[in-house]
Image: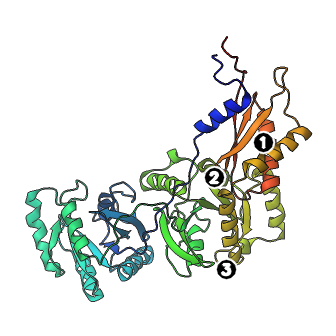
Amino acid sequence: MTGEYDDESGWIEAELADLEVDSAEETADTGPQPVVAVVGRPNVGKSTLVNRIIGRREAVVEDVPGVTRDRVTYEGTWRGRTFTLVDTGGWDHEATGMALRIAEQAQVAVELADVVLFVVDATVGATDADQAVADVLRRSGKPVVLAANKVDDQRMELEASSLWALGIGEPLPVSALHGRSSGDLLDVILDALPDAPPQRFGAERGPRRVALVGKPNVGKSSLLNKLAGEERVLVDPMAGTTRDPVDELIELGGKTWRFIDTAGIRRRDRELQGADFYASMRTRAALERSEVAIVLIDASDVLTEQDLRIISLVIESGRCMVVAFNKWDLVDEDRRYYLEKEIDRQLVRVPWALRVNISAKTGRHMDRLVPAIERAIDSWSSRVSTGRLNAFLTELVQGTPPPVRGGKQPKILFATQASVEPPKFVLFTSGFLEETYRRFIERRIREEFGFAGSPIAVNMKIREKRAVKKK
């Protein structure tokens, strides 16, 4: 060694200069954006067209009708202008049961939209179902852009012209699959929109993002509907009703929150097929773009491997966590006793997670959810001053020094909190600290400074050998 650092302070200063400080991703708040609702009968390529417009594979696509079931929102950008794109389920005027409820969600999307993008399969032509939808759209009074989809070549453009018969304007031939004329379609949509805000970049934070995660049929969609005070997403006893992550802006406690309802995470991805597999991937992506995860667990049932695996995913993502034990109205005294035993035994990895007992069906204790979310986010964003941290660790090490390793006792030379969201602490040491001692430090940091509901990381930077000066 060259003796670049001849004392501990020089080494620490150099390491601090090189330390990469993470910063939480912030979303610019662009204000209200114009809304484009994408509607049409089942299996005409709506979700494929949505993916083409937003430029990435977000909406779940499969060659069977009924894959999209809820109103799902995305942000689109074209020519520097932004707008909200709402993908909807297949709209069938003769639907019953689940299909009827899907069609009702599509009608709600039209009512809330500024412009309607009506997608029709040009290879099939105008069907009775298309004509029924067109009649409803004419009565709505909303501007309608008619997309004649699946026009993959010039020959098919002649077939698309027959869609004039729907009586809602010129059919625009496009191919969602290949992107043919998608730019022309977007030009027409922008011309029909009200004044749209320009695309903006900045550090202004938008609504805090909350992901609702859990295994299938634990009540995620019911919880979202209860919080919103209306049926925003479909609820059905059949597991797997939600497939796309569904974003909803909901005002609670005087604040606007962005709740993300996700598909139920199943045991193993390799067991999934088709749309369920891609829905699982999108659930993970939704977790990554959230700030806090509400893990819903069915309190009336035993904790399962799936529940524990989902909690592990949240830990790995670094998001703060609130564990909501749902269906509390079904829990009797015996079940409460055994549930506490299960929590003590199986949730030992997350004693820091905030816990709320709720019933999305009856609304019981729903008022406790937002305070828990706020407390978790505050912990996730908290920073401990370097002076307080080092004074605390000095006293801690004096009382409980690190275990000896290789005949030498490592020293903690300096400590700092390197980042927030999630909080990460770095210990500059003269040697390796055993994992058990690092867990001890983490536990004592929590006892001293809080961080309820937030994961924290305690890492080391080791100076194994003291540098020697050049002669």
The image shows residue 97 at horizontal and vertical percentages of 44, 77
Residue at mark 2? 420
Residue at mark 3? 362
The image shows residue 439 at horizontal and vertical percentages of 78, 42
The image shows residue 207 at horizontal and vertical percentages of 53, 68
270 or 314, nearer to the observer: 314
Q: Earlier in the sequence, mark 1 or mark 2?
A: 2
- Quadrant placement of the C terminus: top right
31 or 77, nearer to the observer: 31
- Left or right: residue 417 compared with residue 92: right
Quadrant in which residue 18 is drawn? top right
Residue at mark 1? 439
CA distance separating discs 1 and 3: 40 Å
What's under tag 3, amino acid-wise? Answer: Thr
Q: Is residue 174 visible?
A: no
**Does 273 sit above or below residue 247?**
above
- Badge 2 crowding class, 10 Å Cα cut-off, few under 14, some 14 to 19, many 20 or more, is some
Taking the view exactly as shown, the residue that stands out farthest to the right is 399
Q: Secondary structure at mark 1?
A: helix
- Badge 3 crowding class, 10 Å Cα cut-off, few under 14, some 14 to 19, many 20 or more, is few
What's under tag 2, amino acid-wise? Answer: Val
Q: Earlier in the sequence, mark 1 or mark 3?
A: 3
